[in-house]
Image: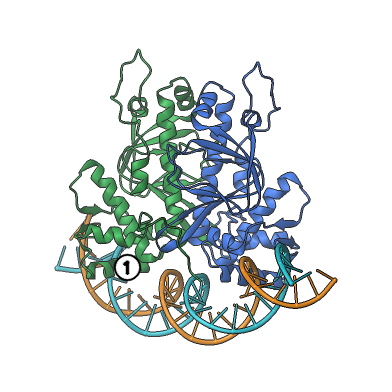
Chain colours: A green, B blue, C cyan, D orange
Amino acid sequence: MHAASIGQHFNRFPVNADATNPPLTIKALFSKQALNQIEAGSTLFLEGDQAKHLYEVVDGVLRVFKIISDGRRIITGFLFPGDLVGVSLRDRYLYSAEAVTLTRFRRFGRREFQDAVNSSPSLQPQLFDRICDEMAAAQRQMVLLSRKSAEERVCSFLLERLRHQQQTSPLAMVVDLPMTRLDIADYLGLTIETVSRTITKLTARGIFVPEGRHGLRILRSKSLERFAGDDYEDDDCGHVARRN
Amino acid sequence: MHAASIGQHFNRFPVNADATNPPLTIKALFSKQALNQIEAGSTLFLEGDQAKHLYEVVDGVLRVFKIISDGRRIITGFLFPGDLVGVSLRDRYLYSAEAVTLTRFRRFGRREFQDAVNSSPSLQPQLFDRICDEMAAAQRQMVLLSRKSAEERVCSFLLERLRHQQQTSPLAMVVDLPMTRLDIADYLGLTIETVSRTITKLTARGIFVPEGRHGLRILRSKSLERFAGDDYEDDDCGHVARRN
DNA sequence: CGCCTAATTGACAAATTTCAATGGTGGTGG
DNA sequence: CCACCACCATTGAAATTTGTCAATTAGGCG
């Protein structure tokens, strides 16, 4: 993927937890905070709440979503260990956050966090990087929601998850999906039925095999990539004629 | 709209263009840069290019987009006078930018911009605010693309444009649409035909009347709001049934 | 082992896209 | 100044994709 090759990540610095020096990494900053946890299904905060804190997911998975009229839900993202919740917001949360699974997290007062970042030149680029990642992800999602077919959406999602997992276990070929089909549907802008049918169809084609209810063993990751539909690196310059 | 009530805007400070003091606003920072312009239809930069500059639109309109396989185009945003292009990016542009109309702009080296912002405590919150706005806009767009009907998308778009124009001329009731229907379609994740049909339908309902090819006089802005589908501020908890 | 909920599957409906044709507008050159 | 051309927009009809509604199946946990 293109985006992966783009940025240097500054958030892999060695951790300095020494109390006399300011922390060198955001991770170190959070590591001093108390560890909390919430049950699967419970709410971390609601859209519109005063945004008093920032959160770092330590363990588990969160879903971040908005609700619009007649109860339609849009999951704008899932958050995994190491992710920050609420980096780019002002005084109110723009979305709600719930635990998909039992989730442990640390939190930080927004004001204190800002102060810490502002006073540390080494933290600023890290925060900026995180924000850029968030923005890039948002744009990828807009592409997905705007123009991709159900099949492309599901493949993109699985690929995203696979790649993410491979950052920690490079050889992993089983995509773990702790969230429900409804969560996936609300993330991909589809219905539960369409997600299910698409998974069935891809299974039939031998792209993967289900492994329990929350796992898919990827058999042909190349096909997955091909079906994901973001191969703008294709033949030539990508300025070719378009429909009609 | 909810988002509008959320943040304080720090970018309305009085401009200090005095050469001896650092500029107090991003606008002031840019105001010292040379004015350039590009023709309608020409390219400012391409996705994947080295991101050497940041741009401020002075006059005109830009479209910002990505292209995926088989030439599908996704316009992730339009940029109007006062907007910045490329605040949240690393070393490469994540999207291409083209002029919709003749556009005048100023630009700034990214490195210099970062330095200026980092060395000025008054600029930092301004930049942060811009980034938050960008993120909030991206999320609104995800909601739109994920779950809204064609009618809701078109109404949301027109409302967005109307509100934007009313920031400068509060009583304006004519939405100016300098972009083509294809641009609108690629922004809303629809086809040109669906956009056209939807506009026809809304015209028939007396929501607005066309004024030339690039203008719509809004007659019933309340209806427009109602049809836009983001009335989560409703009576009570926002889980009520709606519309038609 | 059996229940409960999540997931799958099927038949049908609805919304949007696709394909095709027509209409309109603005610009340019005769 | 008008006519024509190119491009953009609109409209219609058919096709396709996805959503909706209604069963049915199957994991996983007590």
Task: Find residue B236 and report its horizontal and vertical position in percent.
Answer: 59, 54
Task: Find residue B192 and report its horizontal and vertical position in percent.
Answer: 57, 68
Q: Chain of mark 1?
A: A
Task: Find residue B157 and report its horizontal and vertical position in percent.
Answer: 61, 57
Amino acid residing under circle 1: Thr
Rendered image quadrant of residue B211: bottom right
Task: Find residue D20 and report its horizontal and vertical position in percent.
Answer: 46, 73
Tell me the SS state at disc 1: helix
Task: Estimate how packed mark 1 is, as few (under 14), some (14 to 19) or many (20 or more) residues with alpha carbons within 10 Å.
Answer: some
Residue B107 against residue B177 in the figure, above or below = above
Residue B192 against residue B5 in the figure, above or below = below
For disc 1, the marked residue is: A198
Rendered image quadrant of residue A228: bottom left
Left/right placement of residue B201 relative to residue A135 reads: right
Look at 54% across and 58% down and name the residue there: B187
Quarter of the figure that contains the C terminus of chain B: bottom right
Left/right placement of residue B122 relative to residue B219 reads: left
Q: Nearer the viewer, residue A222 or A170?
A: A222
Residue A204 against residue B167 in the figure, above or below = below
Number of marks in the rendered image: 1
Left/right placement of residue B224 relative to residue B194 reads: right
Task: Using the rendered image of the protein, determine whether residue A48 is visible from the camera's viewpoint.
Answer: no
Look at 74% across and 61% down and name the residue there: B218
Task: Using the rendered image of the protein, determine whether residue B237 is visible from the camera's viewpoint.
Answer: yes
Residue sitting farthest toward the top: A20
